[in-house]
Image (cartoon, rainbow, N blue to C red):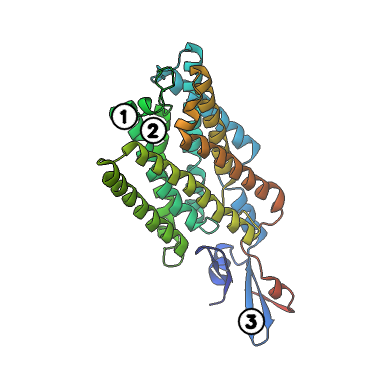
Amino acid sequence: MMNGKMSGGGGDGVLFSAAAASEHNNGQATCTSRHSGSKPILHEALSMDDIRQDKTTHFTAQSSNVFKWTTFLLLGGIILGTMLPQNPALPSATWRLLSSIIGYTYFLSWSASFYPQIVMNHERKTTRGLSVDFCVLNVLGYCCYTVYTTTFFWNQRIIDEYKLRFSSDEGESAEVTVQGNDVAFALHAVVMATVTLSQIGIYDTFTARPPSKRVLVIILATIAFCIGYVCFTWVVKGSVDFLGFLYVLGTIKVGVTIGKYVPQALLNKSRQSTVGWNVLNVILDLTGGVLSLIQLVGDCASMGDWSGLFGNPTKLFLSMITIFFDLVFLIQHYFLYADKDSYSQLPLEAQQQPSIEVKC
C-alpha cells in the first residue's frame, strides 16, 4: 500500500493511505511519486471535492452560521441570566442582571465551542489536524480549573479565608468573584475536553497518534509540584494552605492554556493549513473570552473593589490568553493559510525533485 506522510510536532504527524483516500474520494485521488535517488517520496493529494466537503461540513464559520449561533447564545444567556440566581454581592441591581446575562452568555459560548470540533471529528471519522498535545493539556487544565472554581464557589472556609486575606486596610472584606456560570462552565468543559480526547483513541488510536514526551513530562511535573506544595506548607505552617493550593491550580491552568494553544498554532504552521481545525470553535471561544473579561472587570467596577481582578487571576489571564491565541488562529485561517487547503505539504527538498504522476 502506498502511503504519504507529513511530520508534525508532538505526535501529530499526518499519515495518509492512498488506497483509503481513493475509496473516500470515489476513485478521484491522485498520487504523486517523487524520486530522490533510489527512494521515492510519495505524496497523496486530496481532490478538490473532498476539500470542499471538509470546508462545508455542518459546522462551518459561514456568516449565516455565525449569526445563528450568536442569536442562539444571546437568547440563551438572557433566559439563563434572568431566571437563575444572581450575584448578591453586586450593589447595583441593573449591573447584577447584566452581569448574570453576560456571564451565562460567555458560559454558553465557551461551552458551545467544544461541539463544532467534536462533530467535525465524528463526521470525518478522524482527528487529523487536531493536536494531540492540545487535547491532553486541555483535560489537565480543566481538571485544575474545576477544582479551583467549585471550591471557591461552595467551600465556605475558603471563601472566609479569601475575604480575610484580601480585606482592605479599612477593614472592608473582599468578595469572591467566582460565579455560578464559572462553575457551570468548568464542569461542562472537563467533560467535553475528555470526550474530544477520547475521539483520538476511537478514530485514530493513541498508538498512531501518541502525545509527545514533553506533555507527559508536564503532567508528571504538575502532579509532583502539587504534592510538593501540600507537603511543604504542611511542614512549614503546620497545616495545608488550601487557599494557596487553589491559586497553584489556577496558575497551572493558565500555564497549561498557553501550552495547549502553542502546539495547535505550530501544527497549523507546519501543515500550512487549518483544515481539520474547526474555525467556528475559535469564534465561539473568542466570544466567550471577551465576555468573561467584560464580566470580571464590570463586577469589580460595580463593587468598587479592583482587588477582585487579582483575587481571581485565573479568570483574568484565561480570558486574555484565549483572546490572543484565538486572534492568532483567525489570522492563520483567513489570511495566512486561506488558500492552502491540502491536508499535507511536501518537504521543500521533495518539491524540488522531478516528479512522475501516477493515477490511482
Mark 1 nearby-residue class (10 Å; few <14, some 14–19, many ≥20): few
Separation of residues labelled 3 and 1 (CA atoms): 62 Å
Quadrant in the picture for residue 349? bottom right
Residue identified by numbered label 1: 154
Separation of residues labelled 2 and 1 (CA atoms): 10 Å
Q: Name the residue at the bottom extreme.
A: 38
Q: Name the residue at the left extreme.
A: 238
Residue identified by numbered label 3: 40
- Position above or below: 88 against 17: above
Amino acid type of disc 1? Trp
Dot 1: element: helix
Quadrant in the picture for residue 8? bottom right
Q: Residue at x 53, y 48 (%)?
A: 258
Mark 3 nearby-residue class (10 Å; few <14, some 14–19, many ≥20): few
Closer to the camera, 349 or 118?
Answer: 349
Amino acid type of disc 2? Val
Residue identified by numbered label 2: 183
Q: Earlier in the sequence, mark 2 or mark 1?
A: 1
Q: Nearer the viewer, mark 3 or mark 1?
A: 1
**Residue 240 at x, y = what percent?**
28, 41
Q: Residue at x 45, y 32 (%)?
A: 312
Dot 3: element: strand
